[in-house]
Image (cartoon, grey):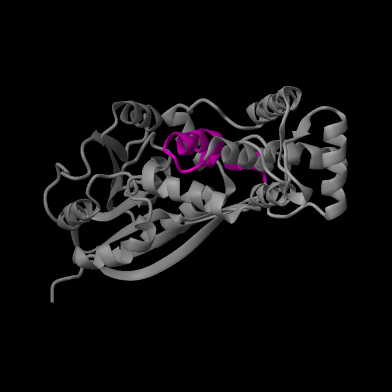
Amino acid sequence: MRTNDAQMLVLSALADGPLHGYAVNTAIERMTGERLGRGSLSSALARLRGKGLIEYLEGEGRRRPMRLTSAGREVLEGEIESLAHVAGRIFETVVPDKVAYQDRLAATDVAHSYKQAVLDALAVRPGHLVLDLGCGPGTDLGALARAAAPAGMVLGVDSDPQMTRQALTRIAGLPHADVLMADVHALPLPPCSADRVRTDRVLQHVADVPGVLAETRRVLRPGGRLVMAEPDWDSLAVDHPDLDVARAYTRHITDRIVRNAIVGRQLPRLAEEAGFAVTSVVPVTSVFREVQAADQVLGLQRNTERAVAAGYLTRRQADGWLDHLARSPFFAAVTLYIVTAEAPAPT
């Protein structure tokens, strides 16, 4: 570690008040996952004291506490401002438009892969009536309509007016597709009318997952098929030296951001409880090695700020977290499950 890095770590460790040398290194270990070597720490303390950035309080030996001077605090605040500027160029700070966000996700390589797996599992045939529950802006209606043509059709269902308008625009000219603005908890369709039903990252947001599955069971004909692709946000793993900070970030996502954050792992049980026969469960893990690509999906800075406001992270933890993500080699992963279920045929 460079001497200047060591000096900034010491200043950061002293931000909340006086500490003696051992306690400084303990605080640095909490922030970075490693302690400074004895020589690096001694050199950093001597240089900072020589610059007038820290001062010793009364005490004896190595237990003698030290604190930031006003000049030291100014230097530290300037560094934090600089880091915020760097983070501002890397992380999104504004919540993206809903349609743009859905389109962005659909354009990723991982989305292409799992969406094709969902389409394969659906096994749509000409003549089928296919329901796309929570169809959003209609990203996948075209592919489903082509699979059901010429005698069948796809019906997209969404309760959001903006999404349904966009979906209707996108299927204009497709004779085998339509969009219905409706609540997936109460589908305006007769019993046993659909051959195939799909959900794609929808059940994580609904108010009543068992209720939606029961409604799906009602409208699906005997022998019909339901394919669901839903994430398990508790599986979100972001590499960071402080495991407690990384876990706190994920815990905030599962507790506060996503309504049904672990629905991916629950789907096989919930589907069977709704009367379906589960025939396949396939995990698909998204791996991110580039921080900006991950940020476009995960909203790293936005959700970090929310975690601070909710008390899951301190301000200092959040600043250190974002600085590490922005400057260090990046890794994150999260798992989505594709669950295939069938409505039992009458015996």
Does the magenta segment cover residue 232? no
Viewer can see residue 1: no
Viewer can see residue 144: yes
Q: Quadrant of the C terminus?
A: bottom left
Q: Main secondary structure of the magenta part?
A: helix
Residue 257, image x, y percentages? 39, 41
Give the vertical position of 261 relative to 91 (above or below).
Answer: below
Residue 114, image x, y percentages? 49, 55
Taking 208 as reference, is 16 left or right?
A: right
Q: Residue furthest bottom?
A: 347
Does the magenta segment cover residue 311? yes
Residue shown at 72% from the left, 38% from the top: 58
Taking 274 as reference, is 225 left or right?
A: right
Give the vertical position of 253 relative to 101 (above or below).
Answer: below
Q: Nearer the viewer, residue 177 or 203?
A: 203
Bounds of the magenta segment: 290-313
* Residue 228 found in image quarter: bottom left
Residue shown at 56% from the left, 54% from the top: 333
Give the vertical position of 347 relative to 204 (above or below).
Answer: below
Residue 18, image x, y percentages? 66, 38
Q: Nearer the viewer, residue 148 or 326?
A: 326
